[in-house]
Image (cartoon, grey):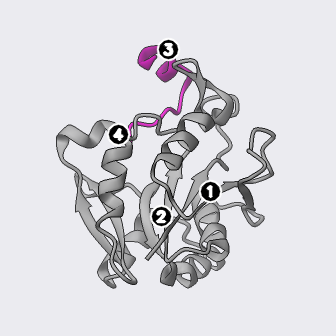
């Protein structure tokens, strides 16, 4: 089994007011923080998912466009699942700069053939730092063709079908899932 990774950078950043990917956090742009993290995991490949090819994308990394109309991270994950070469896809949001490579690596160690890993915090899925098996690609495509674009509901169905293993996140590790959605978050957390 080998893991591909996708950096999900397709959000509109409405609450932030400008592109999150290029915002500086601790003197580095968010895209660089997250790519450095993914590179530490030595995945088989790293894809960049967004609505359009970002100017900051390193040329050696493949761009995967969200199919129009974009349905948020569901679109990015579906496109990456269809494009990847690995047996599993690690999806990581651009706005989670506190994610820890050791912790994320421990999630990668829990994958099984045909089964991924879905972190859970207090019964709520964390689908933007999760690992999906290639076999769920059709489930994502079907969700995009319907009218329910909720990753919470989709991942709940995938857990029920046995294609994702729900893993409870200990309180001490919930901090890894903090995301930056508003300008005040950058000021407070710097």
State if disc 1 and disc 2 touch (CB < 8 Å): yes
Q: Residues within 10 Å of mark 2 (few under 14, many from 20)?
A: some
List x then y, in percent, for residue 8.
60, 52
Which of marks 3 and 4 precedes in the sequence?
4
Q: Which residue is mark 2?
A: 151
Distance from disc 4 to disc 3, alpha carbons, whole Å, reads: 18 Å
Q: Which residue is mark 4?
A: 176
Q: Which residue is mark 1?
A: 72
Q: Nearer the viewer, mark 2 or mark 3?
A: 3
Q: Residues within 10 Å of mark 3 (few under 14, many from 20)?
A: few
Magenta stretch contains residue 178 = yes
- In the image, residue 42 sits, relative to residue 158, either above or below, namely above
- In the image, residue 61 sits, relative to residue 145, either above or below, namely above
Distance from disc 2 to disc 1, alpha carbons, whole Å, reads: 10 Å
* Magenta residues, start to end: 177-190
Which of marks 1 and 2 precedes in the sequence?
1
Q: Residue at x 54, y 74 (%)?
A: 86
């Amino acid at each position: 089994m080998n893991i591909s990774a996708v950096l999900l950078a397709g959000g509109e950043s409405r609450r932030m007011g400008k592109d999150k990917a290029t915002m500086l956090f601790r003197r580095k742009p968010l895209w660089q923080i997250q790519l450095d993290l993914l590179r530490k995991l030595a995945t088989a490949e790293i894809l960049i998912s967004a609505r359009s090819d970002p100017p900051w994308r390193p040329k050696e990394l493949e761009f995967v466009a969200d199919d129009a109309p974009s349905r948020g991270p569901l679109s990015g994950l579906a496109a990456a699942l269809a494009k990847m070469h690995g047996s599993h896809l690690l999806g990581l949001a651009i706005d989670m700069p506190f994610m820890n490579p050791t912790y994320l690596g421990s999630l990668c160690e829990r994958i099984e053939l045909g089964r991924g890993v879905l972190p859970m915090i207090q019964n709520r899925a964390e689908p933007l730092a999760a690992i999906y098996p290639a076999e769920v690609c059709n489930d994502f495509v079907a969700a995009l063709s319907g009218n329910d674009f909720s990753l919470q509901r989709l991942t709940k169905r995938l857990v029920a079908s046995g294609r994702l293993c729900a893993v409870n996140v200990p309180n001490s590790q919930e901090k890894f899932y903090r995301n930056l959605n508003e300008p005040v978050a950058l000021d407070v957390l710097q």
